[in-house]
Amino acid sequence: MKNQYFGDLNDFRKIGLIRSLTGFGRLSTAVCWMLTPDDTTTDGKFIDYLQQPDKYRQLDPELFDKLKYYVSTAGERRVSAVDEGWILPSAKCYYEVLLDDAKDRSNYFQSFWELAEGCDFIFFDPDNGMEVKSKPAGKTGSSKYLYWAELVQAYSLGCSVLVYQSFRRTKRDEFIRQMANEFISKTGAPEVYSFRTKLMALFLLPSQAMSLTLDRNISLVEQTWFGELEVVRHSRSDTPMFNRLYVSNQSGQDVFGS
């Protein structure tokens, strides 16, 4: 995550998803923003949706209004506004900047594990998503990735875990299937949910203790975010099985953007 991304369309969808999945603060939540320094790219520029309240505000009116205030009125693109604006109620957010250095990374996550102790739900927001072979931990650019060992540790705490993932240069349906299978095989999770837009996916590993609660909350996502996300359930026995909860809006057109 970078401050320059705060409040863009994908951020609206991402934070809205977290709010829905956690019952708007009913599940104790720890957020590891995996914050990295801003860069000179145009990433995070998709904020025109804030001028389209008729289309987007009904998805999460409170979130829409708060993001519009910070981005359009106050002109503040910073992740720490999540706490100031009570955007993720009762969540414990970790805002430290993550560096590429391996020792720094070890200390970073040690502090986060202490913060997340006892939480029901953990969200990781790496710039790019899960690790790739070309970026081993400690190398330049490694701060943009979450490593499988870190994910496994989070899931082993008994938490439900949600992870941001950007797409790679491959067919996206195939990529989603491959990633879901890898989440299942590496963590032993019985099922994984993918939440997809045009440019990103998020993968949810429900804990056994929270599975029924999350099933209800995913149904809420289905009803509220219809047309903005594509939701697929992947189970260990599927190889894979897809239950598409919603894909497009009522006109039959995919509503993907950002």
Image (cartoon, grey):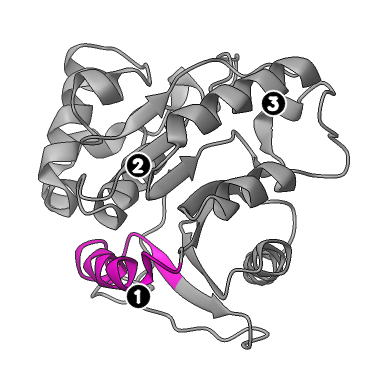
First of labels 2, 3 by sequence position: 2
Which residue is more in the foreground, 172 or 33?
A: 33
Please say if the residues under marks 1 and 3 sit with CB atoms less than 8 Å apart: no
Residue 29 numbered mark, or none? 2
Residue drawn at x 35%, y 61% as measured from the top left? 255
Asked whether residue 178 is drawn in magenta, I would say no
Residue 214 located left or right of residue 242: left
- The spot of residue 152 in percent (x, y) is 66, 51
* Quadrant occupied by the C terminus: top left
- Quarter-wise, where is residue 214 in the image? bottom left
Amino acid type, label 1? Tyr
- Circle 2 SS class: strand
Residue that label 1 marks: 246
Amino acid type, label 3? Ser
Q: Residues in magenta?
A: 208-231
**Is residue 190 shown above or below 256?**
below
- The spot of residue 226 in percent (x, y) is 27, 67
Residue 256 located left or right of residue 91: right
Q: Disc 1 to disc 3, how far (Cα)?
A: 33 Å
Within 10 Å of disc 2 (Cα), the crowding (few <14, some 14-19, many 20+) is many
- Quarter-wise, where is residue 173 in the image? bottom right
Residue drawn at x 82%, y 21% as measured from the top left? 140
First of labels 1, 3 by sequence position: 3
Q: How many marks?
A: 3
First of labels 2, 1 by sequence position: 2
